[in-house]
Image (cartoon, rainbow, N blue to C red):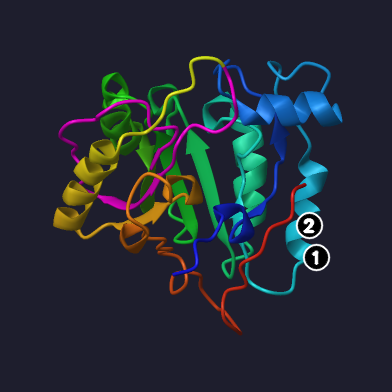
Amino acid sequence: MEIVNISKLIKTLNPVNGCTAGCVYCYARKINNRFKITPDFEIPEFSPHRLKQIKQTKKSQIYFMTSMSDFSDWHEEWRTIVFDYIKDFPQHIFIFLTKFPERIHFQTDLKNVWIGATITAKNEKRRIDALRSNINAVNYFITFEPLLNDLGELDLHDIKWIVIGPETGNRKGKVTVKKEWVENIIRQVDKENVSVFMKDGLASIVNLADIRQELPFNDLAENKEEELQISFDFQ
């Protein structure tokens, strides 16, 4: 099978740039510093004019809205502006991700919105409960990336999609994913009938035939005049 990089399937749109998490493996900070998007990446900045790109897009798209930020850092006013805007575009899918769902109290009934939490290690599994408890949304997903250790047992009820990926880059102390860590997640995912997308970086770790790259979005956007267009464009 052909292994696809997820960046070719999902279009990024970043109304907010900057994150306070300070992760040592952060790729977004490197991008920000390279292209000088904001002067201080640890101070998130809101750029609502970027939302106009949605209106200019004719074909249905999957938009990742937080590739350069964490949803927990968004001010309440920013969330209100963004969600008031995207509610008029039911043909698109909008994805939001956070490492700190416990900091967020938010609700949306938009069927084309997916809100997820990042889990990298066993001691972060509480974020799954925090996601379901603090955020009232139609669609939940979990990103296990970078996967840093074996996660043990997982409570995946109400989770509709998971993404699994290894640490990227070449930092000193970089963690290499073990095959059994991935197999443990997949075993539990299959019990819950959850869609799973395994990042292309796992191709050297698990058997090629076992790589699964499932997207649960294609039938979920409303009022589509044509098939969902999947593409990538860094903004």
Query: Are there few (<14), some (14-19), or many (20+) residues within 10 Å of tag 2?
Result: few
From where the camera sits, is residue 79 visible? yes
| Residue 187 screen position, x and y as percent | 17, 50
Q: Is residue 84 magenta?
A: no
Residue highlighted by disc 2: 53
| Residue 177 screen position, x and y as percent | 37, 33
Q: Give residue 89's quadrant in the image.
A: bottom right
Which residue is located at x 49 percent, y 22 percent?
174
| Image position of 8 (left or right of 235) | left
Residue that protrudes farthest toward the bottom in the picture = 225
> Label 2's element?
helix
| Image position of 36 (left or right of 67) | right
SS majority, magenta? loop
Which residue is located at x 80 percent, y 55 percent?
52
Residue highlighted by disc 1: 56
- 132 or 40: nearer the viewer: 40
Query: Could you tell me if the residues under marks 2 and 1 are in contact, i.e. CB atoms within 8 Å?
Result: yes
- Establish if 105 lies above or below 182: above
The kind of residue on which mark 1 rests is Gln
- 137 or 198: nearer the viewer: 198
Write down the region rendered in magenta: 143-171
Q: Is residue 159 magenta?
A: yes
The kind of residue on which mark 2 rests is Gln
| Image position of 173 (left or right of 216) | right
Which residue is located at x 29 percent, y 42 percent?
182
| Residue 107 screen position, x and y as percent | 43, 42
Figure quadrant of the N terminus: bottom left
